[in-house]
Amino acid sequence: MVRQSARSLACEFLRGLYAYLGGIMIHRRAVSSRLSQALRVICLSAVLGMACLMLVACAGKKTREADDLRRTVVEMASKKAALPEVPGLSVALLRKGEDTPVCAAFGNAALENPTPLTTDSRFKIGSVTKVFTATLIHRLIEEGKLEYNTPISRFFPTYPNGKDITVRNLLEHTSGMPEMLALAQVQQNLARYWSAMELIDMVAKQPPLFRSGTRQQYCNTGFLMLAVIAEKITGRPYGEQVLDMFVGKLGMESLVVGVDGEVVPRLANGYTSNGSKMQLPLQPVLLLPRAQATLKPHRMMWCAL
């Protein structure tokens, strides 16, 4: 109520000043030019002064709101971070219309050698990378270089029933392809660096799970293919395309592209829980070769919140 009253008084004051200035202009011939100029300067100074006061009040309000928001974020996140199955937690909350997020970090980035987690820590984003892959594909579609209904046989001519599986099926997880991470060969050799074409060739030898377009089932294989498709169309490495679009054009400067074996500064470790203790997950490493370079196609990025 007090804040609203102050705003109302300020508005009334400004309206009064504008009316007064208007009166001066109407009767300017009856007042000497020197006096009229002095009055205008006085009134203008008063208007500017009131405007400054209002700006200061607004700034103070925003500061209080930001402090309240930070307290709320810290309070809620700290409760989650206190759970025994949460080794560390980093939170970034960006309000609509603002540019600077509220950031907070709790716990440890590594349990082996306790290292405090900070807001600058980087995290492997896992399958969230599919969002980046899909964005590259959608850009190619917008540029007319690809279509949703383009069959994968255009890029993988020997893949069984490739004419019946489209780019849309890959994007929407409706291809019916077997899951590459569930292949017996992969499960039996989790430490091996598998190339994209090795995995695609192994999947091609398996019977489809269902006819494309009739069901939906989450599938990493399809997004591996999409990464290869993006490379084949552009002639550029997948990672280079990601960096160009998301770092170069969109300013996501904390995004890093690499492979699991790479040393990444400020990288937080990931863990799983067997119910009683934390343990490091063992996952297959997937590589996408291009000339002499190797890039991981869909679980390859790290970012700081």
Image (tube, rainbow, N blue to C red):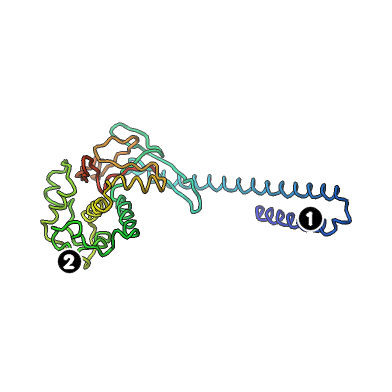
Residue toward you, 109 or 198:
198
Which SS class for mark 2?
A: loop
Identify the disc placed on residue 21.
1
Q: Identify the image quadrant of the N terminus.
A: bottom right
Residue 253, quarter of the rendered image: top left
- Give the image location of residue 136, x and y in percent: 32, 53
Residue 69, compared with residue 28, is above or below; it is above
Furthest-bottom residue in view? 214
Q: Do the residues labelled 1 and 2 touch (CB within 8 Å)?
A: no
> At label 1, which amino acid type do we have?
Leu
Asked whether the viewer can see residue 279, the reply is no
Give the residue at x 11% y 50%.
184
Which residue is labeled 2 in the image? 211
Which SS class for mark 1?
A: helix
Furthest-top residue in view? 113
- Give the image location of residue 74, x and y in percent: 45, 44
Q: Is residue 16 left or right of residue 53?
A: right
